[in-house]
Amino acid sequence: MSRDTLTYYKTVKFKIEHHIMLKVSDLHAEINGKEILKGINLEVRPGEVHAIMGPNGSGKSTLSMVLAGNPAYTVTSGSAEFYGKDLLAMAPEIRSHEGLFLGFQYPVEIPGVSMMNFMRAAVNAKREYFGKSPMSAAEFLKLMREKRAIVELDNKLASRSVNEGFSGGEKKRNEIFQMAVLEPKLSILDETDSGLDIDALRIVAEGVNKLKTDNNATIVITHYQRLLDYIKPDIIHILYKGKIVKTAGPELALELEERGYDWIKEELGENVN
Amino acid sequence: MEEALKQYIDLFEQNRDAIDSHSAPLLNECRPVACDILKKLHLPRLGSENYEITDLPKILGHNYGLNINRIPLRVNPAESFHCGVPRMTTSLYMLVNDTFVSRPEAVDTLPAGVEIGSLAQFATTDCNTVRQYYNRLADPYNPVVALSTLLCQDGLWIRIPAGVKIERPLQLVNLLGGAENLMTVRRIVIVAEADSEAKLLVCDHTSTPDTPLMALQTIEIYADRGAHFEYYDMEESSESTTRLSTLWVAQKCESNVVINGMTIYNGTTRNEYHCAFAEEGSRLRLYGMGIADRERRIDTYSRVDHDFPKCITEELFKYSVDDQARCAFTGLVKVAPGAEKTEAYQSNRNIIGSDEARMFSKPQLEIYNDDVKCSHGSATGRLDEMQMFYMRTRGLSEPQARLLLKQAFMADVIDSVEIPGLRERLTQMVERRFAGKSAGCHDCDSDCPAVGK
């Protein structure tokens, strides 16, 4: 047996032993009667970082919204399993409890709801789901302090209303802060790099990397290669017209950066011009 | 004569001696004029201008009885009263139906010269002073005013002498209850003399939540030069309670008045606010909120007259309407030609929680002067879907997210409350209310006698 074959064997064996975390099969979804996702297939295992790239309008955000359970979207066919459970049958809050997290491209402002109350409600809802009693005030404050440090989130932001009056960078940092608090198994970060300057991007990416373990996984959705300089993906998918048209290693990102998306379209036999 | 009003006119004409004998001469001498007005009065019909959801002929046509012979209730709830608002100390007074219940310890805490007590009693002992204020501000042709003038036997009188500042908030508990179909008629007259300061919290409770009851009230507030007066009105009654309230405010120069009307639990309510600046340089903050579900009705009419220069009005009313409930907001701010440098801001915002719920909103500005800053606006909609989804992705259930969003919606009205302790209590009450934890004030945590503990 050659050395290469042996490595391949080990890899496959390793993967088989590991449960598949997320398995999306032939997923079709629409909004307002318009089909956006046209048969998505995707498998994510613990410890992996996936990047989903693609031109505007290819369905990247729709995929994240559908996986997180936004009721505005309708799944018309296909399936998605999370640790073998039917993800699509779960309410968004159950998906959250089970370990799915969505970092929003446009984090929502909620005037009048303080960040602290919001996070306390979130933490305790999860505890209740797992039959635990609510966290004490002291424990909760300690947790907030620890997690804030990961993304260098200002204390005064935590005392304000959710995302209200936050800058673009603060909003994205706040997303990673929430991710740190909720400790998800799978994080989907939708265009987390959009609207960030280089310093904010670095802080956000470092936050994501600090939270990385062998037991969790991340799906980074991005338009540009830039973020992938900081968050190194294992696998890159290209989403185009509602389908994953190419899956490859990290080198694919560099190729996209150099050549744009047009060559993908050419490969698919489309007339670019 | 209006059919609905006939029973009251008959009642008055047949029992005039009994009504008069349990009241004060000053109150009695106003009745005949009110009677003549009522005989000619046409009640506005349901759906007519400013009466989109209140059916006055139907409400007043109901066969209510009055306790004109003032038969006392067997239990004096005032004796056991303890306000459950945490960290809130008030000087507490009660009107049990329309009877003033004296609590001597409350009087002891007041600065010298402050008068608080039975309107009928003060109208008897100090007729000349009360005469300057009683029934002077309210429009005699307003149906609720005319009826309350005709039938009112007692109420509350408050006079804060010039320069006196009452630190501790005053609290009035209106406790409604007793016999089936009882109508209570009360008048409240508040005189805040020059440079005086006071805060009053009025709580409406119902001790017998299942019996149909009616409260008819007229409140007159005079804020003299430089006075600062805050009036918080909180209704926590029952589904079978009907409340018709008119409130009249006159402000002299550089006075500062806060009016905040909050309907937490009710049945059918119409609140009217009529505010006028009688001199220049005054400020009015007029706030209100209402939470309506099931078949409840909350109707609000407000009118602010800017007849003098340099006065400021900030007006904000918010409603949450669910199930088959209906709410209405009609607000008029009128700026007269001479009222330059007026600032008036009016806003009405509402959230609708069901397909059957209805909100009627009519914000109005009438401006007859060029040198003013005015704005008005109204927005009615559902809770934001994206906010709901965002909260759910963080693990909050749909009802939890809805609760937080509704509470947040009412936050600015609650935050305007300046009585220590009341803001926190209101936040809790609104939370409980939206959580559906309490079916009425009888489930409330307070030891209020309305609870019957």
Image: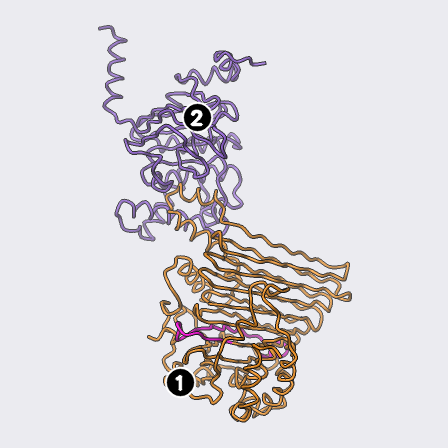
B176 shown above or below B418: below
Give the residue at the far top of this rendering.
A2
Majority secondary structure of magenta residues? strand
Which chain can be seen in orange?
A: B
Q: Amino acid at mark 2?
A: Tyr
Q: Is residue B299 magenta?
A: no
Give the residue at x 51% y 46%: A164
Q: Tell me the element at label 2.
A: loop
Tally the marks: 2
Identify the magenta region: B190-215
Name the subunit of mark 1.
Answer: B
**Where does label 2 land, which residue?**
A230
Q: Is residue B255 left or right of residue B356?
A: right
Give the residue at x 28% y 9%: A4
Give the residue at x 41% y 51%: A117
A230 shown above or below B273: above
Tint of chain A? purple
Q: Quadrant of the C terminus of chain B?
A: bottom left
The x and y percentages for residue B135 are: 62, 82
Q: Tell me the element at label 1.
A: loop
Which of the numbered marks, if any, corresponds to residue B73? 1
Q: Amino acid at mark 1?
A: Leu
Q: Residues within 10 Å of mark 1 (few under 14, many from 20)?
A: few
**Marks 1 and 2, Cα distance to the nearest angstrom?**
77 Å
The x and y percentages for residue A189 are: 43, 32
Q: Is residue B192 left or right of residue A247?
A: right
A72 shown above or below A28: below
Name the subunit of mark 2.
Answer: A
Instruction: Please tell me which residue lies in front, A52 or B39.
Output: B39
Q: Quadrant of the N terminus of chain B?
A: bottom right
